[in-house]
């Protein structure tokens, strides 16, 4: 338990007392107590769905709590909208940036707090102020640049500038490192320490244990809407924190046999792909994956991984290069042909590509196979075959649902992913492409999916794993390729590299192949 | 034991979902009827007498039923057209134009084919050809829009509306020109009568209701079977619910969009050609105005389900048919019916309003049809 | 807007004008034809311009509005009706009655838009269905009242349609007077100046439409209101997090859009011809949407596209004027139904995007959920 003695410079700037919030079907905040001291970096740790973002959204005014009060600088605050919290000096940088891509940096920063001269927007005044803040805090941004094309790290800086523009003294950062390379994360930590040195207090939401131990002054762990404990980094370690987060002993590493690689299954040569804005996002990429091995593609999101996996799975036509699966040329072929050649695809966006949410689990289980026997005969669907198949898979893959007729949209994220995994991995496959397979899932589901991936690999299937979570890549992969700005900048055996080295490659520093 | 429990809950589940499906449309109609009554009273009419006239005129006699069935026939076809498109995620506002095109070109084959060939045709060949040609032209009319959407992303809402006006202009041109009935006493823009061999016979002696009505019911069943029991239907529905997942599932989204619009247009074209071959035996300019827009209301009221469409078509047919009797009894203009139908549409479309008024909780996902213009 | 789009617009206008000049020059000097057609183009483009502006405001705020046609129709009816009531029942002078008519039209447009806003924003009805409902409601309502109020039992007008107080006057811009001294006695010079003057002599709503284009552009891109409107249409959550009331902004912009549509409606029955016919809007509301899309959701772009459609309508009018001098090999130009296809085919062609990809506001058509 943390000490409650406060010295003069450790005054409490923000306090949440007895906060309770009920959403339909889920108690997101359950009598939460939380406090923030001046000039501290207070980490809020918990797995996906623990209630961290909800608590912050309540403090920021995006929702109203059912019960409880928020106290800012000693006075009870009535926060009905972001306007109120901004006026109290609270600023928030959301996990998914609240930036308008077609606006400039200046327009984004001034939105809601516009400087007006003679009826029209005073862009010059805003630009001047932004430059001032840039200099003062070391946050370099170009006020006249359009936000859309800016790299993610710079976009984040714009978000921080936005809060400082409004004189924020309490800054909330929601999962800020999800989109950063390890180096950029270090940069961010430096900026955070700078800010706290100037009297800004920071709440830092994350699910990453290592970061929290590296940068926080205090750590509050949340689970299922409740605060479990508040500790100092010096008083705890990863295992203890993980235990608090999940409520039981968590195995932090994956058990993996030494792999016996067979022949090449997937061969990619000189692949180039353009994205929807017709910009080339994959440049001349070549690599191969053998049966019985996991090749992990590491890299921060936005470096071409999405377009690469779309090109490999038939969702997008490459503009150049060749893709071969088990000797068959499948470059630019439609998804069905590639699936029939032995591909299983676990898509990045499960709700957009992987499932039809209003269909039942039964229909979703047959989503890719409905068109051939036994699921249909000569164009007519065979409901019994679909039913049998679904029940079998629900059992085998432990999908938690009251009935197979439930629509997929009603399942939890973890169970939705299990439906997709069940469907894809129960086919006779030669290659699995898994793109961000555990994003947004609870620890239990993450463990399950990791074990399924290793099972596939042990069975001799080639696995291409694309993930922005470096820990996941290092735990599951046999070989790792790093993708940076659309190119493979390094390919190494997992045993021959370190987290730091991978981080450097992910940030674009020296390009060498092992 | 387990399966017994399952089958009981299955029946219960089916009954539950039917009652859920009917509740909102029923309340929507009820509310519209009440508000319609208020409007009638407001403009000085007698609501009870008006609704009595409506019911008498639409169902009060064998002849009334026959006329209602006649009105219902094109409504069923056109309603199915719009409903099928909805299921495919497409908004076919062009039923109006597809219908007109179907009617005009059916009439052409109906009156001109024997002349071109130089000999008379037996009905068993002539009639199906006539109907088929109209159906195909309707399909083409919509298929063009489908192709534009699939290959250029051009939004089907505006394109189908444009095709409506193009159809209007084209049929006006034809009916005032080369297809005009050239008999000396005729001044209206209409085709000559179609040959006897191209006419659908009536079902009963003395009543106008014809076998096209039975065909409409059969086609409704056929569309239900297509949508729910075939792989094509699965593809259409999947593209309608989530085109991204459909692509991932291996479905050829572009081809499905075109096929959906083709089928939809064919149904609307059928509406026109059945009217020509079963009822009027010719096509006259202005005959089919408004069917296409009524079809949208019918599809929405029937929740895009073929059975719902049939029931909704009957409701609208009864209203149109009974309106003349209502006007006779109360001197209220038949346009009042349009008002009430518009109100029904309003409440069905905004079922959230009905839920709010009657305090019904919302269950399940909302079907979103609009994906903006970008597609 | 990029040059590709502008040059396409220029090309079409040149073609349309060219056809008319080539046919009509046997009857009238080219300058006369061009200026007269230009004057007509500007006039008939008025409802399209206003309709497109209506669309721009609604959609920039994130609400798809295909009910513009219905809003124009109801506004045309109630504006006309309002003028008649003021003139015949309240005995107000014609000019005042007409002004009231315009006011009623704008008010009606705003009210219909309010209905659309309630359906789309509060009840989160699918916006295309909502717009279709507005259109169907408009047809039913105006048809019913048109019959009932004049021919129904107990009608104050006892079975006849009273004469409207009139139309808005053309406003004369004194270019001829200014150039009087310059031209001196040259009859030719005077004739040319008079012809050019005709382009500028427009009616109030037409003039307002052009002014509103530039005002809208300024508001949308240079004021706080415009910035917030665009934010709400691109990324409403982002706007919400900086304290902007998304619902209020959307309501306000939709109602403003409705008022523009209302003014367009007034054009039909108060500026163009002083009478009401069922369905007199004839698809102009939908063509406005095409103009908006082609103009990439900008006021000036939409105006340029509206002028193209206006020109195609002017083509139709002029082909009827020059019917008798159309050369036999182009006899199809005599058929008003065929020439009348031009705006619709143009619309479809433009929507294929061959002339350039268009980007709607990112959150267009998506109801906002907190």
Image (cartoon, rainbow, N blue to C red):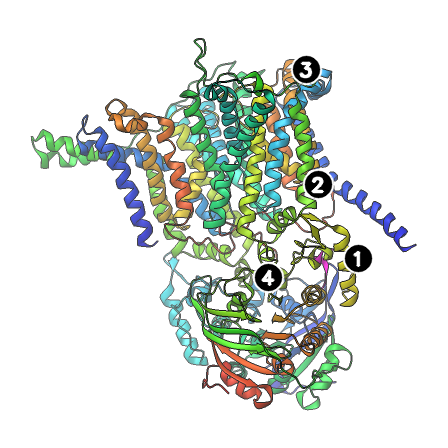
On the image, numbered disc 4 is attached to which residue?
Answer: A81
Real-space Cα separation, disc 3 to disc 4, in angstroms? 68 Å
Query: Mark 3 falls within which chain?
Result: B
Q: Give the quarter of the image for residue C131.
A: top right
Segment colored magenta: A404-412
Q: Does the residue at mark 2 contact the one at mark 3 (Cβ under 8 Å)? A: no
Give the labeled residue for mark 1. Answer: A403
The lab-note entry on whether marks 2 and 3 share a chain reads: yes
Could you tell me which secondary element the residue under label 2 belongs to? helix
Task: Return the x and y of residue A242 as percentages of the image width and height.
Answer: 72, 81
Closer to us: B227 or C368: B227
Q: Are marks 4 and 1 on the same chain?
A: yes
User: Label 3, on which residue?
Assistant: B207
Viewer-side residue, B197 vs A241? B197
Name the secondary structure under disc 1.
loop
Identify the residue at image location x=15%, y=36%.
C178
Residue B96 falls within the magenta-colored stretch: no
Q: Residue at x 44, y 47 (%)?
A: C56
């Amino acid at each position: 338990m943390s000490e409650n003695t406060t010295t003069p410079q450790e005054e409490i700037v923000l306090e949440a007392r007895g906060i309770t919030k009920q959403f339909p079907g889920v108690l997101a905040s359950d009598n939460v107590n939380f406090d923030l001291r001046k000039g501290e970096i207070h980490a809020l740790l918990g797995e996906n769905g623990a209630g961290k973002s909800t608590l912050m959204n309540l403090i920021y005014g995006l929702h109203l709590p059912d019960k409880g009060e928020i106290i800012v600088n000693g006075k009870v605050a009535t926060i009905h909208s972001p306007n109120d919290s901004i006026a109290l000096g609270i600023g928030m940088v959301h996990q998914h940036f609240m930036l308008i891509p077609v606006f400039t940096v200046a327009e984004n920063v001034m939105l809601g707090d516009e400087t007006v001269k003679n009826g029209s927007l005073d862009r010059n005044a805003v630009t001047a102020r932004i430059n001032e803040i840039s200099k003062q805090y070391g946050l370099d941004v170009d006020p006249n640049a359009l936000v859309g094309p800016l790299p993610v790290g710079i976009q984040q800086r714009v978000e921080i500038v936005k809060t400082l523009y409004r004189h924020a003294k309490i800054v909330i950062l929601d999962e800020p490192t999800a989109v950063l390379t390890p180096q950029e994360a270090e940069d961010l930590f430096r900026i955070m320490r700078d800010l706290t040195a100037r009297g800004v207090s920071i709440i830092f939401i994350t699910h990453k244990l290592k970061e929290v131990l590296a940068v926080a002054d205090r750590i509050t762990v949340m689970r299922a809407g409740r605060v479990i404990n508040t500790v100092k980094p010096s008083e705890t370690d990863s295992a203890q924190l993980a235990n608090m987060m999940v409520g039981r002993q968590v195995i932090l590493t994956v058990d993996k046999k030494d792999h016996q690689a067979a022949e090449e299954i997937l061969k990619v040569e000189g692949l180039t792909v353009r994205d929807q804005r017709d910009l080339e996002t994959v440049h001349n990429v070549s690599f191969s994956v053998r049966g019985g091995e996991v090749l992990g593609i590491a890299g921060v999101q936005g470096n071409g991984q999405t377009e690469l996996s779309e090109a490999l799975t038939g969702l997008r036509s490459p503009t150049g290069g060749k893709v071969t699966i088990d000797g068959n040329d499948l470059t630019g072929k439609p998804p069905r042909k590639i699936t029939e050649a032995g591909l299983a695809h676990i898509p990045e966006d499960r709700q957009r590509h992987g499932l039809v949410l209003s269909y039942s689990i039964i229909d979703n289980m047959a989503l890719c196979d409905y068109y051939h026997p036994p699921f249909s005969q000569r164009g007519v669907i065979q409901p019994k075959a679909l039913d049998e198949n679904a029940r079998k898979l629900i059992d085998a893959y432990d999908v938690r649902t009251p009935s197979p007729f439930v629509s997929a949209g009603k399942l939890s994220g973890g169970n939705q992913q299990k439906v997709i995994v069940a469907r894809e991995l129960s086919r006779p496959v030669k290659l699995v492409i898994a793109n961000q397979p555990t994003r947004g899932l609870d620890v239990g589901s993450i463990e399950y999916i990791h074990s399924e991936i290793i099972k596939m690999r042990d069975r001799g299937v080639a696995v291409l794993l694309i993930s922005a979570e470096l820990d996941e890549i290092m735990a599951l992969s046999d070989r790792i390729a790093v993708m940076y700005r659309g190119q493979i900048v390094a390919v190494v055996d997992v045993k021959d590299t370190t987290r730091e080295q991978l981080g450097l490659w992910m940030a674009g520093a020296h390009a060498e192949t092992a | 034991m387990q399966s017994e429990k399952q089958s009981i809950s299955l029946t219960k589940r089916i009954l539950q979902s039917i009652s859920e499906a009917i509740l909102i449309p029923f309340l929507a109609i009820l509310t519209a009827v009440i508000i319609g009554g208020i409007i009638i009273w407001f403009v000085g009419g007698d609501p009870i007498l008006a609704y009595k006239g409506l019911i008498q005129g639409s169902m009060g006699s064998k002849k009334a039923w026959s006329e209602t069935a006649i009105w219902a026939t094109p409504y069923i076809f056109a309603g199915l057209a719009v409903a099928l498109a909805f299921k495919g995620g497409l908004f076919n506002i062009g039923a109006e134009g597809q219908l007109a095109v179907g009617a005009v070109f059916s009439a052409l084959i109906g009156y001109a084919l024997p002349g071109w060939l130089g000999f008379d045709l037996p009905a068993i060949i002539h009639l199906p050809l006539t109907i088929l040609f109209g159906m195909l032209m309707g399909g083409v009319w919509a298929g063009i829009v489908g192709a534009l959407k699939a290959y250029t992303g051009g939004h089907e809402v505006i394109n189908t509306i444009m095709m409506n006006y193009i159809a209007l202009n084209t049929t006006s041109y034809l009916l005032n020109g080369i297809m005009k009935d050239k008999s000396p006493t005729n001044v209206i823009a209409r085709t000559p009568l179609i040959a006897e061999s191209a006419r659908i016979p009536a079902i009963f002696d003395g009543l106008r209701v014809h076998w096209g009505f039975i065909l409409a019911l059969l086609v409704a069943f056929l569309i239900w079977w297509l949508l729910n029991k075939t792989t094509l239907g699965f593809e259409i529905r999947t593209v309608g619910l989530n085109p991204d997942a459909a692509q991932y599932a291996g479905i050829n989204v572009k081809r499905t969009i075109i096929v959906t619009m083709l089928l939809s247009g064919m149904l609307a074209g059928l509406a026109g050609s059945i009217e020509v071959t079963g009822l009027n035996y010719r096509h006259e300019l202005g005959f089919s105005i408004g069917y296409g827009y009524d079809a949208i209301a019918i599809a929405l009221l029937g929740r895009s389900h073929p059975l719902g469409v049939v029931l909704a078509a009957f409701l609208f047919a009864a209203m149109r048919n009974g309106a003349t009797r209502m006007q006779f009894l109360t001197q209220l203009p038949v346009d009042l019916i349009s008002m009430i139908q518009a109100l029904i549409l309003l409440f069905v479309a905004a079922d959230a309003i009905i839920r709010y008024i009657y305090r019904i909780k919302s269950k399940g996902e909302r079907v979103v049809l609009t994906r903006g213009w970008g597609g | 807007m990029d040059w590709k789009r502008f040059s396409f617009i220029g090309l079409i206008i040149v073609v349309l004008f060219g056809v008319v000049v080539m046919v009509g020059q046997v009857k009238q000097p080219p300058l006369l034809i061009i200026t007269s057609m230009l004057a007509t183009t500007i006039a008939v483009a008025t409802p399209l311009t206003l309709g497109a502006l209506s669309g721009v405001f609604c959609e920039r705020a994130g609400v798809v509005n295909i009910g513009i046609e219905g809003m124009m129709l109801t506004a045309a009816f109630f504006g006309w009706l309002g003028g008649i009531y003021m003139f015949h029942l309240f005995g107000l002078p014609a000019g005042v009655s007409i002004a009231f008519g315009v006011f009623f039209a704008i008010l009606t447009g705003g009210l219909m838009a309010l209905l659309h806003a309630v359906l789309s924003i509060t009840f989160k009805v699918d916006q295309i269905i909502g717009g279709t409902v507005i259109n169907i409601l408009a047809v039913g309502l105006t048809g019913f009242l048109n019959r009932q109020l004049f021919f129904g039992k107990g009608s104050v007008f006892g079975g006849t349609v009273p004469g409207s107080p009139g139309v808005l006057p053309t406003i004369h811009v004194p270019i001829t007077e200014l150039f009087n001294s310059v031209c001196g006695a040259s009859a030719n010079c005077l004739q040319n100046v008079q012809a050019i003057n005709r382009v500028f002599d427009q009616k109030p709503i037409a003039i307002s439409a052009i002014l509103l284009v530039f005002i809208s552009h300024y508001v949308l891109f240079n004021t706080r209101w415009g910035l917030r409107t665009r934010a709400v249409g691109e990324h409403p959550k982002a706007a919400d997090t900086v304290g902007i009331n998304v619902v209020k902004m959307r309501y306000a912009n939709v109602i403003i859009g409705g008022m523009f549509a209302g003014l367009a409606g007034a054009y039909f029955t108060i500026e163009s011809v002083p009478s009401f016919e069922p369905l007199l809007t004839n698809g102009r509301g939908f063509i406005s949407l095409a103009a908006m899309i082609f103009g990439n959701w900008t006021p000036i772009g939409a105006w340029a596209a509206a002028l193209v459609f206006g020109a195609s309508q002017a083509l139709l009018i002029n082909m009827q004027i020059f019917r008798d001098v159309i050369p036999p090999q182009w006899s199809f130009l005599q058929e008003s139904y065929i020439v009348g296809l031009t705006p619709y085919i143009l619309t479809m062609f433009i929507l294929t995007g061959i002339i350039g990809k268009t980007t709607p506001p990112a959150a267009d058509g998506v109801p906002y959920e907190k």
